[in-house]
Image (cartoon, helix red, strand yellow):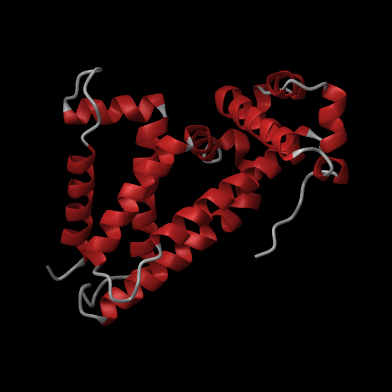
Amino acid sequence: MKRKSYHKSTFEKTSRDRQIKVYWAAISVFSQKGYEAASVQDIAQKAGISVGSLYSYFSSKEDLFKAIAEMGYAVLEQIVKEWNPRKEDSFRSAMTTLFRLTLEYSRKYPDLSKLYLLLTTDSLSPFSEKLSKQMEISFRSAYAQLLKNAQEKGELRSDIDLEMAGYFLDNTAVMLQFSQTSKYYQERLRQYLALSDDEEMPDDRIVDALVNYVCNGLTNE
C-alpha cells in the first residue's frame, strides 16, 4: 500500500541523517510528553535545528505526528514480514514466534510502542479514528490467514469464531507490548509475577504461558 507523505518537498532534499534525527526527536518528545503537551519548539530543540527549519519540513505538529505514525506502520509491517507464518507451520510455533518478536521489537523501539499506547487514549481519539484501520490491517490479515489455515488443518476447534479469535490474539500481543514499554504495565506484570525490581523479565516463562493460554483456548491439543 502506498503511504501518504505528510512532509514538504524540502524535507526530501535534506540529508538522510537529518531526516532520521528529526523523526527520532519527534518520537522521543511525543512519547515522553504526549501530543498536546509536546511543542514544535521542543522537537526542534531535540533535533538540534531551528523552529523555522522544522516548519519548512512540516506544515504543522499534526502532520509531523502523522509522519512518525507512518514510521510506526513500517515497523508493524516489518514484524508481520519477519513473522510470516507459513501454511505448514503449526499454530503453536507461529504463536511462539509472534510473542518473541513482540518482546524483541517492543524493547528495540520503546518510544514507538509508547506512541501506540498514546493512540489508545481519549486525548488522541481524533487520530485514532483516522489511523486505526491503517495500523491494524497488516496484522488483521496475518491473523485471519493463520487461523483459517490452522482450522483447515484441524488444529483449531471447529466452533471457534475466527474473526473474534484474531481480535483476542492481537489484544494479547498488544498487552505484551505495553508490558515492556509502559512503566505502569511493567510494574503490573512484576506484581503478578512477584518479581523484585532488580530481577529480569523471565521471557521464556512469559512466552510459554501465553502460548499455552492461547492454545488451550483455541486448539484441539
Residue visible at 78% across and 22% down? Answer: 49
Please state which of residues 190 and 202 is positioned toward the viewer in this rendering: 202
Asked if residue 175 can be seen in this view, the reply is: no
| The quarter of the displayed image where residue 90 is located | bottom left
Image location (x, y in percent) of residue 77: 52, 56
Please state which of residues 21 and 136 is positioned toward the viewer in this rendering: 21
Image location (x, y in percent) of residue 128: 60, 46
Residue visible at 21% across and 22% down? Answer: 199
- Total marks drawn? 0
Residue visible at 55% across and 36% down? Answer: 115
Above/below status of 71 relative to 4: above
Please state which of residues 79 and 138 is positioned toward the viewer in this rendering: 79
Quarter occupied by the N terminus:
bottom right
Please indicate whether residue 206 sits to the left or right of residue 67 in the image: left
Quarter occupied by the C terminus:
bottom left
Image location (x, y in percent) of residue 104: 37, 42
Please indicate whether residue 138 sits to the left or right of residue 21 in the image: left
Please state which of residues 210 and 54 is positioned toward the viewer in this rendering: 54
| The quarter of the displayed image where residue 8 is located | top right
Q: For the view shown, which residue lies furthest in the left direction?
A: 221
Please indicate whether residue 10 sits to the left or right of residue 125 in the image: right
Q: For the view shown, which residue lies furthest in the bottom direction?
A: 152
| The quarter of the displayed image where residue 190 is located | top left
Above/below status of 213 relative to 147: above
Please indicate whether residue 62 sits to the left or right of residue 72 in the image: right
Residue visible at 76% across and 19% down? Answer: 41
Image location (x, y in percent) of residue 171: 38, 50
Asked if residue 155 can be seen in this view, the reply is: yes
